[in-house]
Image (tube, rainbow, N blue to C red):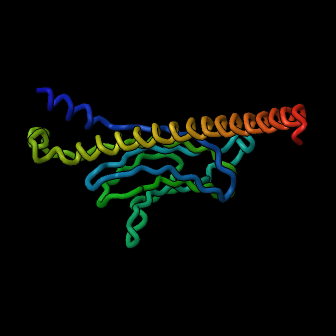
Amino acid sequence: MLLRLLLLSLLLACACAVSFTLQPEQEQCISELLMPKAILTGEWSFGPAKENATTENATLASMRVISPAAGTPTLFESTDAAGHFSVTATENGEHRVCVVARAAAVQASLVAKTALEVADHDLAAKREHVEALEQEIEKMENLARHALDASTRGRLVWVEVAMMCTLLVMGLWQINYLKAFFQAKKIL
């Protein structure tokens, strides 16, 4: 039962929503690392930016999903002002969802979700079919470990800078003290 609850919680979609303004001929992409048979779904909407709200509803922008493979780079492409997309990854790699503004500034909104494709949930609960979930958990743990390592490295740099400054100040103080001492003893 616990394994099924874990499986169900991992199969729930991870979602990210972004909204941004693009200038004419500007491209903005979001990326997601996907495993084979992972599903990337989402919705998009385009509208004129606030500064040119009177723009006619012509082709404001285009949206496309790009695969990491060199042979078939575009998995989905559309110039509609709003819509929904769903693609299944065929290989490991970074899949990108890109929006390109055409002739005018565009306000774009993207909502992307990822999930593992499972045909039979009872079959997926068996031990031999949990590898994809284990890879997903390992990926999340690696990302958390990387963030911790980066923050620790940043703190260590500041500690080392403080130690170097302390050593420099102590060295200068020692030189001045010894100089004054030897001048008082009339050795220098």
With respect to residue 48, does 8 lie above or below? above
Q: From the viewer's perspective, tell me whether residue 48 is left or right of residue 184.
A: left
Q: Quadrant of the C terminus?
A: top right
Q: Is residue 59 visible?
A: no
Q: Nearer the viewer, residue 155 or 42?
A: 155
Q: From the viewer's perspective, tell me whether residue 99 is left or right of residue 140.
A: right
At horizontal 23% and vertical 43% (from top left) the residue drawn is 133
Q: From the viewer's perspective, tell me whether residue 165 is left or right of residue 40.
A: right
Q: Position of residue 6 (x, y in %)?
A: 21, 31
At horizontal 66% and vertical 59% (from top left) the residue drawn is 25
Residue 146, image quadrant: top left
**Residue at the bottom extreme, as displayed:** 71
Q: Is residue 129 visible?
A: yes
At horizontal 80% and vertical 36% (from top left) the residue drawn is 178
Q: Nearer the viewer, residue 58 or 68?
A: 68
The number of discs equals 0
Q: Position of residue 151 (x, y in %)?
A: 52, 37
Q: Nearer the viewer, residue 117 or 163?
A: 163
Q: Quadrant of the N terminus?
A: top left
Q: Nearer the viewer, residue 43 or 126?
A: 126
Q: Position of residue 41 (x, y in %)?
A: 37, 46
**Residue at the front extreme, as displayed:** 186
Q: Position of residue 98 (x, y in %)?
A: 51, 54
Residue 139, image quadrant: top left
Residue 169, image quadrant: top right
